[in-house]
């Protein structure tokens, strides 16, 4: 009998693990985890170091997020050495071990741990920290969670409760996940997890202090949405020597005063930026700017912009609102004569309610006209004949007449497309301030990445401390993804590569994301022909696609784990 007749073929995936390992080792994440995680209280050596378990969980979230109970099956499909494991250690992974590791992770100082990783990233990849962006999102939870969580290791976990849900699910509980990123590649550098009912305007001062400690000075530009434009917060940052940029809420008296002025006068706006419209590349998006001569009540600069795209959107939205209001008011006529709409004042009140619901007050004027429809009724009983008398009856009918207020529409049209920014920086020009704020959507993409690509919800955990620890892992995952994306794009510019065939059917991609880069390596396997005693007869690998080899060259990663020679 030939020895090969009793052989078996082992096929395990290498996949994107060498690329991920390169990032993990560059940042020294496992060593940082070992330094921060508290030792076990059991007093005996651990079968698996907690830092190793957390690292594997981090790789799982990055590559193929699964419930904890599915981790052993996921691990069994990969080359264990690429996960930093010995073959026998793979069998020691189970949901209980991973859950206890999350408990240990929560018990440590998560803020200090994240700071050490970020400092390593700043030094290794030379991240610029002169402009930082902040925003928050909600992580929605299904199922029942206790309203009050017990203290664990002297720390109170965030409360999973109801709040203003940004996923438009007010029926579900949530946590608030706050993230700060650099303008240099939108790399996450700070995060915090808040109770589900926390408002953004309560968080900015503590976040700014944390960023100041991370940067080492207050000399950076802090950018956030309109919840930053609170008097106490803006004055605090200004008094501490920092700079900020935010959208001024339209509810502020300064904004209302300027809009009133703009509706009655033609102000001297000038063009400050011109972009290609992604919806229609044949027409540009033009931004005009104007610095208000008056300042905010706190004494800060007000910069006003008119966007041609926002102008079109405002016009279309208003036209849609007015059309819907007209339609609903016309539908009221079918209810006249019923118990609730018998009198003209009742009909007018119902119409005004519709105008308020669709923000059409002042743009549509409604008046009630009472008319009479003529009807004929037989006089007396019996079947009608040629000589049966009929009497004429006047039936009252209410009509709602809707007219447009052309003067009000013309006035509001002059404010279409306008939006204000507020800043205490004396050096920012109109062009620079707009360019800074237009980077805010890149931070919002990180939130989208966490929810769509990394599938943060549903969360398959019931313990709030473990949920908080898992969200810390998501922060590290976002950091790794952003660094990979930034590195690939920088190397492409350096080598003058305009695009890579990363899309399906080898379509070209000009701005690769981390997901596309990792997808180029998914499914690549290592095959071993093993004897009955475990002896290895032959090892071979799936062929490396050209784009995967190109990516390895760009990133400077050793191709040996894929069976290739350097």
Image (cartoon, rainbow, N blue to C red):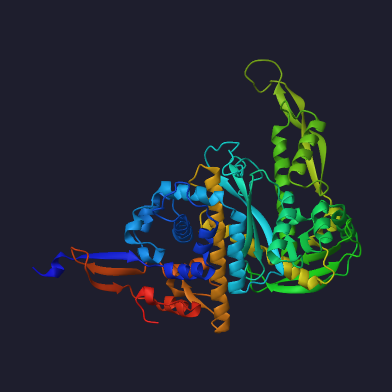
In the rendered view, tell whether residue 246 sits above or below residue 150. below
Q: Which residue is most to the left?
A: 1
Q: What residue sits 77% from the left and 43% below the top?
A: 355
User: Looking at the image, which is closer to me, 114 or 519?
Assistant: 114
Residue 558 in percent (x, y) is at 43, 77
Whether residue 414 is visible here, answered yes or no, is no
Residue 192 in percent (x, y) is at 63, 53
Residue 453 in percent (x, y) is at 51, 59
Residue 391 in percent (x, y) is at 75, 23
Q: Hey, which quadrant is residue 349 in on the image?
A: top right
User: Looking at the image, which is closer to me, 315 or 48?
Assistant: 48
Residue 51 lies left or right of residue 355; in this view the side is: left
Q: What residue sits 76% from the left and 26% below the top?
A: 392
* Picture mark count: 0
User: Looking at the image, which is closer to me, 145 or 94?
Assistant: 94
Whether residue 448 is visible here, answered yes or no, is yes
In the rendered view, tell whether residue 398 sits above or below residue 456. above
Q: Hey, which quadrant is residue 197 in on the image?
A: top right
Q: Quadrant of the N terminus?
A: bottom left
Q: Hey, which quadrant is residue 174 in on the image?
A: top right
Q: Which residue is most to the front?
A: 43
Q: What residue sits 57% from the left and 83% below the top?
A: 494
Residue 139 lies left or right of residue 312; in this view the side is: left
Q: Quadrant of the C terminus?
A: bottom left
């Amino acid at each position: 009998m030939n020895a090969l007749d009793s052989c078996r073929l082992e096929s395990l995936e290498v996949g994107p693990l060498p690329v991920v390992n390169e990032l993990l080792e560059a940042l020294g994440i496992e060593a940082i985890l070992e330094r921060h995680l508290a030792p076990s209280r059991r007093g005996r050596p651990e079968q698996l170091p907690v830092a190793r378990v957390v690292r594997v969980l981090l790789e799982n979230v990055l590559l193929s997020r699964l419930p904890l109970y599915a981790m052993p099956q996921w691990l069994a499909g990969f080359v264990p050495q690429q996960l930093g494991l010995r073959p026998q250690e793979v069998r020691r992974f189970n949901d209980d071990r991973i859950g206890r590791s999350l408990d240990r992770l929560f018990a440590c100082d998560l803020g200090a741990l994240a700071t050490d990783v970020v400092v390593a990233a700043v030094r290794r990849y030379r991240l610029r920290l002169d402009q930082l962006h902040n925003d928050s999102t909600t992580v929605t939870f299904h199922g029942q969670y206790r309203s009050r969580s017990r203290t664990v290791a002297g720390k109170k976990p965030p409360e999973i409760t109801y709040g203003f849900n940004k996923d438009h699910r007010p029926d579900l509980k949530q946590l608030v996940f706050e993230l700060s990123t650099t303008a240099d590649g939108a790399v996450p550098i700070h995060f915090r997890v808040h109770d589900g009912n926390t408002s953004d305007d309560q968080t900015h001062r503590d976040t700014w202090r944390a960023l100041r400690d991370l940067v080492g000075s207050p000399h950076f530009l802090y950018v956030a949405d309109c919840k930053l434009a609170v008097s106490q917060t803006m004055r605090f940052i200004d008094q501490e020597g920092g700079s900020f940029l935010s959208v001024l809420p339209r509810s502020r008296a300064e904004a209302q005063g300027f809009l009133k002025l703009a509706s009655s006068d033609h102000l001297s706006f000038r063009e400050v930026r011109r972009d290609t419209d992604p919806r229609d590349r044949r027409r540009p998006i033009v931004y005009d700017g104007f610095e208000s001569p008056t300042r905010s009540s706190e004494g800060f600069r007000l910069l006003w912009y008119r966007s041609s795209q926002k102008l079109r959107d405002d016009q279309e939205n208003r036209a849609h609102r007015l059309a819907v209001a007209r339609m609903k008011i016309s539908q009221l006529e079918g209810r006249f004569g019923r118990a609730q709409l018998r009198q003209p004042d009742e009909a007018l009140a119902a119409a005004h309610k519709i105008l308020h619901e669709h923000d059409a007050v002042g743009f549509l004027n409604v008046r009630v006209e009472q008319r009479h429809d003529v009807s004929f009724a037989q006089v007396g009983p019996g079947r009608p004949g040629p000589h049966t008398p009929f009497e004429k009856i006047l039936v009252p009918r209410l009509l709602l007449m809707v007219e447009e207020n052309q003067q009000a529409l013309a006035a509001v049209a002059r404010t279409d497309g306008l939006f204000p920014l507020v800043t205490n920086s004396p050096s920012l020009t109109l062009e620079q301030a707009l360019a800074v704020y237009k980077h805010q959507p890149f931070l919002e993409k990180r939130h989208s990445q966490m929810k769509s690509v990394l599938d943060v919800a549903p969360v398959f955990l019931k313990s709030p401390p473990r949920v908080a620890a898992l969200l810390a892992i998501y922060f590290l995952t976002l950091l790794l993804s952003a660094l990979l994306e930034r590195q690939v794009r920088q190397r492409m510019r350096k080598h003058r590569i305009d695009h890579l065939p990363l899309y399906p059917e080898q379509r070209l991609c000009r701005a690769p994301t981390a997901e596309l880069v990792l997808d180029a390596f998914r499914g690549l396997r290592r095959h071993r022909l093993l004897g009955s005693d475990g002896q290895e007869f032959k090892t071979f690998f799936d062929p490396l696609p050209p784009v995967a080899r190109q990516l390895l060259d760009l990133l400077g990663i050793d191709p040996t784990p894929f069976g290739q020679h350097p």
